Amino acid sequence: MAERRMMSKSIIKSDTFLDMPATTQNLYFHMLLDADDDGFINAPKSIMRMIGAKDDDMKVLAAKQFVIPFESGVVVIKDWKIHNYIQNDRYKPSTLPERDLLNIQKDKTYTLKNDVSSMDTKCIQTVSIGKDRLGKVRLGKDRIGKDRVGKDSIDTLCHVTHDDVDKSHIEIIEYLNIKTGSKFKATTKPYIQAIRSRLKEGYTVNDFKTVIDKKCREWKGTKLEKYLTPKTLFAPSHFDTYLNSNEMAAMTDTERKVAELTALIDAVERGTDEAGNVESYGPVIDISEY
């Protein structure tokens, strides 16, 4: 195995990579250093223990499709061929059987082969933090459904047809969770309905991320921070306004109180909690300070 490794700026300087926690990025760098000449890491948990990384760091890497995990515990760096070119006289092919389960695409990324019957399944892998779905790794162009297996927090999801539903809501909820440190469930029906409705109206996934970014910058550290939720951010009455609003460098106390009161009143009028359940009288609010 080579003693030197290279890193491609197109990968590690991308917004997707830099949006990940520092501990997750650190784990990726260490796996790059310890991978064999085909980008496989045979014992990733030993690296995690050595640098103090958590299981969630590996889950985020898999969800963001920077690595492909296998049931055996082996992990491969998806963009390995983009990072590293090893001359033939120095190249030592991986001896791991998982190598035979991968294809190399024209863009030099790894993907799982369509036929992995030697594993007794046609499966691809996705990850979850707790019960919160983070994302997926695609098998070719096929969509996925879910089927939890094993004791790991990594779900192996089996092949289904193209008729499976669009999964954009997973990416959006995952992005919101990363930005806010929350654990909203991507399986919550009101969230899915709100996101799909906005997408049908012509908005894009990037529009959702723009709204999340704007409101996080404006509301974090204020009383409005508790409204950084899918229900508030993606509501039809708010979304377009949030998307096209000019960000305020700072609000005066009066402006902040008006915004907070407006949000509270809106919450009462909607009369639903975060799970989408109807509240008979809406939340109880104290407006004495206003």
Image: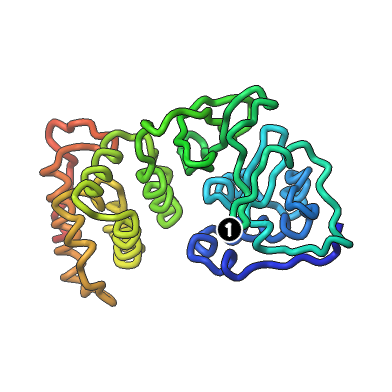
Q: Nearer the viewer, residue 86 or 276?
A: 86
Residue 11 vs 123, above or below: the answer is: below
Q: Residue at x 30, y 49 (%)?
A: 229
Colouring style: rainbow
Most extreme residue toward the top is 120
The kind of residue tagged 1 is Asp
Crowdedness near tag 1: few (<14), some (14–19) or many (≥20) residues, C-alpha within 10 Å = few
* Image location of residue 16, percent across then percent down: 49, 60
Q: Nearer the viewer, residue 123 or 288?
A: 123
Q: Check the picture and name the quadrant holding the N terminus.
A: bottom right
* Image location of residue 67, percent across then percent down: 62, 49
Most extreme residue toward the right is 89
State which quadrant residue 68 falls in: top right
Q: Residue at x 57, y 68 (%)?
A: 10
Q: Residue at x 61, y 55 (%)?
A: 24
State which quadrant residue 83 falls in: bottom right
Q: Check the picture and name the quadrant holding the C terminus.
A: bottom left
Q: Nearer the viewer, residue 167 or 240?
A: 167
State which quadrant residue 95 falls in: top right
| Left or right for 22, reference 89 | left
Residue 30 vs 279, above or below: the answer is: below
| Left or right for 87, reference 226 | right
Q: Secondary structure at mark 1?
A: loop
* Residue designated by label 1: 107
